[in-house]
Amino acid sequence: MQRLARHADVDDQALLLAGLKDKNHYVAALAAEALGGIAELSAARVMIDAFIEMSSDGLKRDPGCHIRAALAYGFGRLEILHADEALGIGIRTVQIEPVGGVRFDTGAHLRANCALALAQIRSQNALRDITLLLFNHGGRFCGSGDTLMRFVEARKAAARALARLGAAEARVPLTLRLAYPEGEAIEVLQECMLALVELNDPDLKETLLPFLEGEDAELAVYAGLMLGQARVAGAEGALRSLIDRLSGSAMRAAVLALAALRTEEAAEQLRQLAVSDRKVVREAVQDAGIG
């Protein structure tokens, strides 16, 4: 099966569908992974039924959630519209099992793949289901419960999925997550920022300026880079202030963000920085090819 999965093409679909039902979970996972890359729409019904059947007793039929995660990827790649029921089950799946002697939720990557697939097929419930995943910290209340950051990858995928939806309505949950960031991991907030850029959010500056002016240098620089990428006018002053209070690679990144704005005000700020009293700032401007 390893050799078949590694070199599979569409002519091997029947063999892979049979492998999907193998009692050996490793074999079934290899088959599912290969199907995710080569399957045609004719295989959809078998793949969906297998997913739903495994979900009825995940611990026994799909320990680690590897098989369903691979199938979810395939549903998205094939844009199987009638896979929405299976993906709706998967995006809510929490599967606690022992990993290295520690109880662990192995469903995180399954939820992530289901979120991305729901966005890919434009499911009717995609916005709602993905939004709930974005705010799922593993506890009853938003911003609590995920002290070990076990749900981070799923929430990052939720942010990417909202961007993939491409709908203006997807900006709302992303904006809410950024407006109330307490308790959230930096990498999730960064994914939300990037998603808003990809969604061409007209209110991007208003949403990101608090981060630009905040105390967290990593988030401030990333917010600046996103404003630069989107070429949002009006952020020049905040970026200049950020450069003045940063040093090292963070300062250099902020210079690049200012340069990316490509406005007259940004150009003037860069000219001033080119003759700054701080040698490192002058060098950063020169390294950026400015001045």
Image (cartoon, helix red, strand yellow):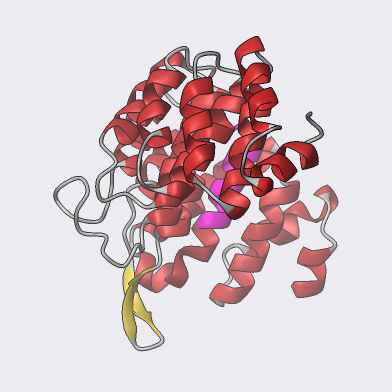
Nearer to me, 50 or 281: 281
Residue 121 visible = no
Q: Residue at the left extreme? A: 140
Instruction: Please state which of residues 284 and 124 is positioned toward the viewer in this rendering.
Output: 284
The location of residue 92, given as percent across then percent down, is 32, 48
- Count of all numbered marks drawn on residues in the image: 0
Q: Quadrant of the C terminus?
A: top right
Q: Is residue 131 left or right of residue 269?
A: left
Can residue 224 be seen? yes
Q: Is residue 118 left or right of residue 77?
A: left
Q: Residue furthest front?
A: 277
Is residue 221 left or right of 274 when viewed as pictured? left
- Which percent across, then down, holds residue 30? 66, 67
For the N terminus, the quadrant is bottom right
Q: From what the image shows, is residue 143 above or below residue 207?
A: below
> In the shown orientation, is residue 283 left or right of residue 85?
right
74 in magenta = yes
**Residue appearing at x 40%, y 67% in the figure:** 106
- Magenta segment range? 69-83
Q: Please name the residue shown 54% across and 48% down the image.
A: 72
Seen in the picture, residue 20 relative to 154 is either above or below; the reply is below
| Residue in view at x 40 percent, y 37 percent | 85
Residue 71 is a magenta residue: yes
Q: Quadrant of residue 266?
A: top right
Q: Position of residue 133 (x, y in %)?
A: 34, 43
Nearest the eye: 288 or 157: 288
| Residue 178 image offset from top left, x and y in percent | 34, 34
